[in-house]
Amino acid sequence: MQAVPLGSCVLMAGMPLLGWQLLSLKGQIVPFIGLQLPALASENKAAASVIKDIHEAGATAGYVLVGLYAGTALFHHYFLRDNTLRRMLRGS
């Protein structure tokens, strides 16, 4: 089993929390599996703008990381001709 990079864990945990915080700061309800989550903070439009920028930067970083991961796998498969992609698809 491979170790998961810390940055991936931060993005996976941080993005939903930032989204929850953003909706709370905008004064909107936070739906989650048919329930309404409590607000993490009172309404504050200025802070919401900052959190929105951070949330969008994190999303962009996530897209770049996924693209790099896929591109690297394809590079290994088509140019290096090793079995990296096959191992990734098998889940081993």
Image (tube, helix red, strand yellow):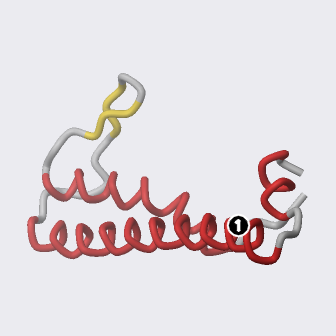
Between 7 and 74, the one nearer to me in the picture: 74
Determine the residue positioned at 30% across, 68% down.
56
Determine the residue positioned at 48% across, 67% down.
62
Does residue 10 appear to the left or right of 52 in the view shown?
right
Does residue 65 appear to the left or right of 48 in the view shown?
right
Residue 43: x and y in percent read 13, 57
Determine the residue positioned at 48% across, 63% down.
14
Between 27 and 15, the one nearer to me in the picture: 15
Residue 26: x and y in percent read 14, 55
Amino acid at the residue labelled 1: Ala
Looking at the picture, does residue 30 appear above or below residue 55?
Answer: above
Local SS, label 1: helix
Image quadrant of residue 48? Answer: bottom left
Report the residue that reaches farthest toward the left.
45
Quadrant in the picture for the N terminus? bottom right
Residue 42: x and y in percent read 18, 57
Between 87 and 50, the one nearer to me in the picture: 87
Residue 63: x and y in percent read 45, 66
Residue that badge 1 annotates: 73
